[in-house]
């Protein structure tokens, strides 16, 4: 009667196992110590793979956390330019808030003139109201964005030379540069356009 191929394979494996056991008995080698180097190598490879996966996840998480969307840049530009273009004599902390939202060259320049800006606004009793009515992303270089901003601002001065309040609406067009700094978006440059 013919033996099935599976039965023959099982018999061959049994014979091989018996032969290994006999060799181990004759040489005095412990069967559990066989593959010691291979076993440690396998564990080392597993540890390296786990560490690589953890590192990849951490780098991906950080990259995702530091990535800002166009909507984030537009929202930041709307808020910051709105504060910049609407001085208010009743709000002495506005210059400080603008300074906190800025970085780089713009921050350095604005920091030098913050006192004069606040004093001028307070002396004139200036109050401006306005709305940023358009923000568009003009360009992107990594995480730095150039945005075009349009705004209409109405400035009221407590008393002009004739002794009455004045209100004159003006349209402003600006190009601003926004970049992340310290985990938050910051205003890096402001250019008024004709």
Image (tube, rainbow, N blue to C red):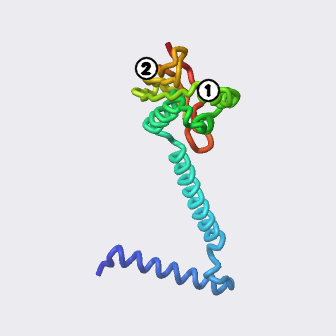
Q: Nearer the viewer, residue 133 or 9?
A: 133
Q: Which marked residue is nearer to the observer: mark 2 or mark 1?
A: 1
- Using the image, tell me which numbered label, if any, was put on residue 169: 2
Q: Nearer the viewer, residue 77 or 156?
A: 156
The part of the image, by quadrant, that contains residue 45 is bottom right
Q: Earlier in the sequence, mark 2 or mark 1?
A: 1
Whether 96 is drawn above or below 32: the answer is above
Pinpoint residue 134: horizontal percent, then vertical percent.
40, 26
What residue lies at 41% left-to-right and 78% top-to-bottom?
Answer: 10
Residue beneath disc 1: 123
Pinpoint residue 171: horizontal percent, then vertical percent.
44, 19
> Tag count in the figure?
2
Check disc 1 and report its element: helix, strand or loop. Answer: helix
Pinpoint residue 159: horizontal percent, then vertical percent.
53, 21
Tell me if residue 95 can be seen.
yes
Pinpoint residue 193: horizontal percent, then vertical percent.
51, 16
Image quadrant containing the N terminus:
bottom left
Residue farthest toward the top in the current orientation of the protein: 194
Residue farthest toward the left in the current orientation of the protein: 1
Tell me if residue 105 can be seen.
no
What residue lies at 52% left-to-right and 25% top-to-bottom?
Answer: 158
Q: What separation in Å lies between label 2 and label 1 (alpha carbons)?
A: 21 Å
Whether 1 is drawn above or below 173: the answer is below
What residue lies at 52% left-to-right and 51% top-to-bottom?
Answer: 61
> Dot 1 surroundings within 10 Å: few (below 14), some, or many (20 or more)?
few
Q: Is residue 71 left or right of residue 190?
A: left
- Using the image, tell me which numbered label, if any, was put on residue 180: none
Q: Is residue 80 left or right of residue 182?
A: left
Check disc 2 and report its element: helix, strand or loop. Answer: strand
């Amino acid at each position: 009667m013919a033996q099935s191929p599976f039965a023959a394979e099982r018999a061959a494996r049994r014979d091989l196992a018996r032969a290994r056991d006999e060799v181990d008995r004759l040489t005095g080698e412990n069967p559990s110590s066989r593959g010691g180097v291979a076993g440690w190598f396998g564990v080392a490879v597993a540890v390296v793979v786990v560490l690589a996966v953890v590192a990849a996840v951490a780098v991906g998480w950080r990259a995702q956390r530091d990535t800002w969307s166009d909507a984030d840049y537009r929202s930041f530009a709307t808020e910051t330019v709105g504060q910049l273009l609407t001085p208010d004599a009743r709000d002495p902390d506005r210059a400080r808030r603008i300074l906190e939202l800025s970085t780089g060259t713009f921050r350095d320049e604005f920091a030098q003139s913050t006192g004069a800006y606040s004093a001028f606004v307070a002396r004139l009793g200036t109050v401006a109201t306005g709305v940023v009515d358009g923000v568009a992303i003009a360009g992107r270089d990594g995480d730095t964005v150039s945005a075009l901003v349009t705004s209409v601002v109405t400035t009221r001065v407590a008393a002009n030379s004739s002794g009455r309040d004045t209100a004159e609406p003006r349209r402003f067009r600006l190009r601003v540069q926004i970049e992340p700094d310290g985990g938050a978006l910051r205003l890096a440059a402001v250019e008024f356009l004709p």
